[in-house]
Image: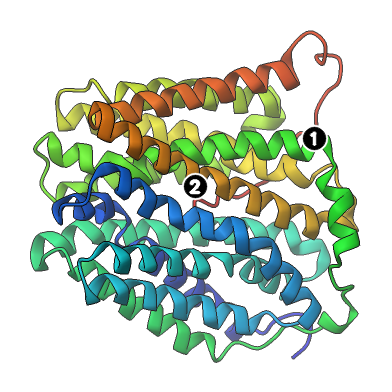
Amino acid sequence: MSRLGSRAQHILFVIVTVLYWCSMYVYMPILSPYLEHVGIAYTMVGVVLGSYGFTQILLRLPTGIVSDRLRKRKPFVVLGLLCLSLSCVCFLVSEQLGWMLGGRILAGVGASSWVAFTVMYAGMHAKEQTSRAMGMISLLIAGGQLLGMSMSGLLVESFGWLSAFWAGAGIGLAGCLLALGLKEPGGLEDRKPMRLEDVLPVMKDRLLWKVSTLSILAHSVLFITMFGFTPSYALHLGASKLQLTLLVLAFMVPHAATAYYSGRSLAPRFGAWPVVLTGFVVSAVCSAATSVVPTFGLLVLTQAVNGCVQGLHFPLLLSLSIQHVAEEKRATAMGFYQATYAIGMFAGPFLAGALNDWGGLRSGFYFAGLVGLIAAYLTHRWFLSASVRSVKGPVPVQGKTETS
């Protein structure tokens, strides 16, 4: 296959990618309510939710290194989809905590293969089209997540709790079978394998550490709220399982829209760091406010605003993490960044779950608000205070969002 993928390969990759994200997120809105439904305490709900991120902390960077050393992407894509399908099967096998924990760990293994997806798709394009390819990837992420999460409430309302996991297993298996038809992009033999000596200098980069720290906090808020306990709170307010679809749409549609435009329009006009700061401040307020809204309608409103402002900082942080890094080291920096922000995907729901057991379901949302304010403070201190105001940071022109 030539370096530039054929049109058929592009279409196949698009379908496989949408199925990948759909399989991963089709049960996400009902996961914490389901765990609560089968009698699992909030602390252990947090452990199950957080295990997804913890697995990625361990596997994302090694996955990128091994993929580069083998000069292969397709096996990781296929195995990633297979793991997602098997993760859903674990939930179908038993309601015991061990099986559910194993299911989320397998989902984390599957999510770790996303490094291979992005590099594979970039390899289907000419070098000068990499930015365009990553823009397309961002739309595929949002599209797959939105499709999966929108199906969740309807499936559970019509066919019961386990229907979402049956759907995830089937979608993942379908994606796995289709992925067998993908071909490795050409030119991999010319790529320099990622080595340990390439990783260590990048890990010492202070700006990368700061941006990664902010991303940890951002992912903590996301996986405490919409990808964590917000659906459970909606049910406590009297929402039906079908209404969870409305909640998902209220969050995801504005989230995808602002993620697409933040780097294209807002950052060039207002500056990247002021936009990031605005996202953190408003998200902190909305997350904390979730605890006090008395009706489902107001909850939908807060989540619409929350989704909108969280879409501001995710793509900008992604772009800022590598924009200052030399071209030959960007893959290493991205692998480090993705492995690091997974800490937030683990720590956020884990700590919020413990707090919810101690002080009730509202406690976790107050904690999410506090995390958002800490992120806002660090953003201002590191990049917008008087001591650094004269140093203008890079302004990314395009970015993408990823919450797996």
Residue 348, x across and y down, in percent:
45, 39
Q: Amino acid at mark 1?
A: Leu
* Circle 2 crowding by C-alpha within 10 Å: few under 14, some 14–19, many from 20: many
**How is the rendered protein coloured?**
rainbow
Q: Residue at x 80, y 70 (%)?
A: 126
In this rendered view, identify the residue nearer to me: 388 or 247: 388
Indicate the quadrant containing the N terminus: top left, top right, bottom left or bottom right: bottom right
Q: Amino acid at mark 2?
A: Met
Task: Say which element carries label 1.
Answer: helix
Distance from label 2 to label 1 (Cα)? 21 Å
Side of 102 where 278 appears, left or right: right
Is residue 12 at least partly visible in the picture? no
Write down the residue under mark 2.
Answer: 345
Is residue 201 at least partly visible in the picture? yes
Residue 63, x across and y down, in percent:
67, 70
Decide: is 298 above or below 78. above
Looking at the rendered image, the disc whose residue lies closer to the viewer, 2 or 1, is 2
Q: Residue at x 44, y 56 (%)?
A: 51
Write down the residue under mark 1.
Answer: 207
In this rendered view, identify the residue nearer to me: 129 or 292: 292
Residue 346's label in the rendered image is none
In this rendered view, identify the residue nearer to me: 254 or 221: 221
Side of 325 where 209 appears, left or right: left
Side of 362 where 17 appears, left or right: right
Decide: is 182 above or below 137. below
